[in-house]
């Protein structure tokens, strides 16, 4: 029974979707090689029911059942390049069931506690990262043993994002196959707050099983303006037949890069350091050594060039100055051309305005 409950809860959130957008659902994950995303979550799902019954001796009684399901979720993704990514998650859980049988003269209470762990691993391929819908296909395995295949699309229109997915899930342990449809939408309120809503419907392929419908609402708060980390609170509602369950989740997620992947800030910093290190030193003596202008110095292996005579330095400096002057003259000429074009456009607009005024005066006469 416990594994059935866990499988129902996990089936509401396909593995690639969990790892793909763990923080800030309105921002697509980084697709550069070496980028990663991770999410840590605490989830709580309570459930209770009460019914009347008659025991073997014909005495009436009331049965009260309370289920408490706690679990931790660890999920993450890593991008090998812009097209291929890998996702994984691990979910250890604690299940506590308390049953109370209340009779006229006595009551019997029993408590059952179980622990379990579930997880999965999936490989995703992005067909066209630059396309409008960004189509994707993922194939994965899950525990308890199962196979998952999912295709999804994302439409990002600032400040709203739309998500859609179609998945096929096959359980190798319980012989339960299902098809799941999912949609989602999100909205950015400001630079720190965002909201998202998801809906999914899982249809079992066995006649004796119930379909499952789930709704999820999430509020995220960015801890910094760059979106590197975020706190999120999520509420879920799932309905299977006459069984309705509510869940609550508190999540913390982050993103970053590993390996030799340069960001824009790193590139700008390297360019600044390079320009400082390659400034020509015209006051050095002929026997002194100057930094090489083509190779950036490092502490581990400093690079130096051969001595250059003073006359050669002067000729190089004068040629650089002449090149700079030519570039400035070309820039000034281009500015004059643009000004002349703007003047011509202004004259055309003035002529059109004059014609319109003449037409208005004729109509008034």
Image (cartoon, rainbow, N blue to C red):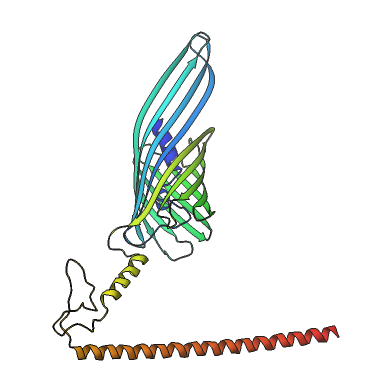
**As rendered, which of 331 and 91 lies closer to the eye?**
331
Measured as percent of width and height from the top left, residue 3 is found at 39, 34
**Rendered view: 287 above or below 84:** below
Indicate the position of residue 2 as horizontal and vertical percent values: 40, 31
For residue 340, side relative to residue 109 (left or right):
right
Quadrant placement of the N terminus: top left
Q: Residue furthest left?
A: 287
- Residue 235: where, in percent of width, then height? 50, 41
Residue most extreme to the right: 365
356 vs 167, nearest the viewer:
356
x 48%, y 23%: residue: 65
Number of numbered discs present? 0
Q: Residue at x 51, y 51 (%)?
A: 193
Residue in the foreground of this view, choosing between 279 and 358? 279
Residue 16 visible in image: yes
Q: On the rendered image, what quadrant is the C terminus found in? A: bottom right
Q: Picture coordinates of residue 196 (x, y %)? A: 52, 50
* Whether residue 206 can be seen here: no
Q: Residue at x 37, y 39 (%)?
A: 72
Residue 9 lies, with reference to residue 278, above or below; the image says above
Asked if residue 346 lies left or right of residue 48, the reply is: right
Report the residue at 34% width, 34% height from top: 116
Residue 287 versus residue 246: which sits nearer the camera? 287
């Amino acid at each position: 029974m416990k594994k059935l409950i866990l499988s129902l809860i996990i089936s509401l959130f396909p593995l690639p979707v969990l790892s793909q957008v763990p923080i800030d659902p309105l921002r697509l994950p980084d697709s550069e090689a070496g980028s990663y995303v991770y999410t840590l979550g605490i989830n709580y799902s309570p459930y209770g029911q009460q019914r009347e019954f008659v025991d073997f001796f014909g005495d009436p009684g009331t049965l009260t059942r309370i289920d408490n399901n706690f679990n931790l979720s660890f999920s993450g993704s890593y991008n090998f390049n812009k097209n291929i990514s890998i996702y994984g998650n691990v979910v250890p859980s604690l299940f506590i069931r308390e049953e109370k049988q209340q009779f006229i003269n006595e009551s019997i209470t029993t408590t059952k506690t179980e622990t379990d762990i579930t997880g999965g691993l999936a490989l995703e391929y992005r067909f066209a990262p630059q396309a409008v819908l960004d189509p994707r296909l993922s194939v994965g395995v899950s525990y308890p043993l199962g196979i998952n295949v999912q295709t999804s699309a994302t439409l990002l229109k600032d400040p709203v994002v739309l998500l859609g997915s179609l998945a096929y899930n096959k359980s190798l342990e319980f012989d339960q196959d299902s098809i799941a449809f999912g949609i989602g939408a999100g909205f950015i309120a400001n630079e720190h707050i965002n909201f998202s809503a998801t809906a999914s419907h899982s249809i079992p392929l066995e006649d004796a099983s119930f379909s499952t419908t789930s709704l999820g609402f999430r509020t995220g708060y960015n801890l910094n303006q760059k979106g590197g980390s975020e706190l999120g609170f999520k509420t879920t509602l799932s309905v299977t037949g006459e069984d309705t369950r509510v869940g609550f989740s508190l999540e913390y997620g982050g993103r970053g890069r590993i390996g030799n992947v340069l960001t824009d800030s790193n590139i700008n910093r390297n360019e600044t350091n390079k320009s400082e290190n390659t400034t020509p030193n015209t006051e050095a003596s002929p026997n002194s050594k100057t930094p090489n202008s083509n190779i950036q110095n490092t502490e581990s292996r400093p690079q130096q060039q051969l001595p250059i005579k003073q006359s050669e330095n002067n000729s190089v400096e004068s040629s650089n100055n002449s090149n700079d002057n030519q570039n400035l003259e070309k820039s000034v000429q281009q500015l004059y051309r643009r000004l002349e074009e703007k003047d011509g456009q202004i004259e055309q607009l003035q002529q059109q305005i004059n014609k319109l005024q003449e037409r208005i005066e004729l109509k008034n006469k």
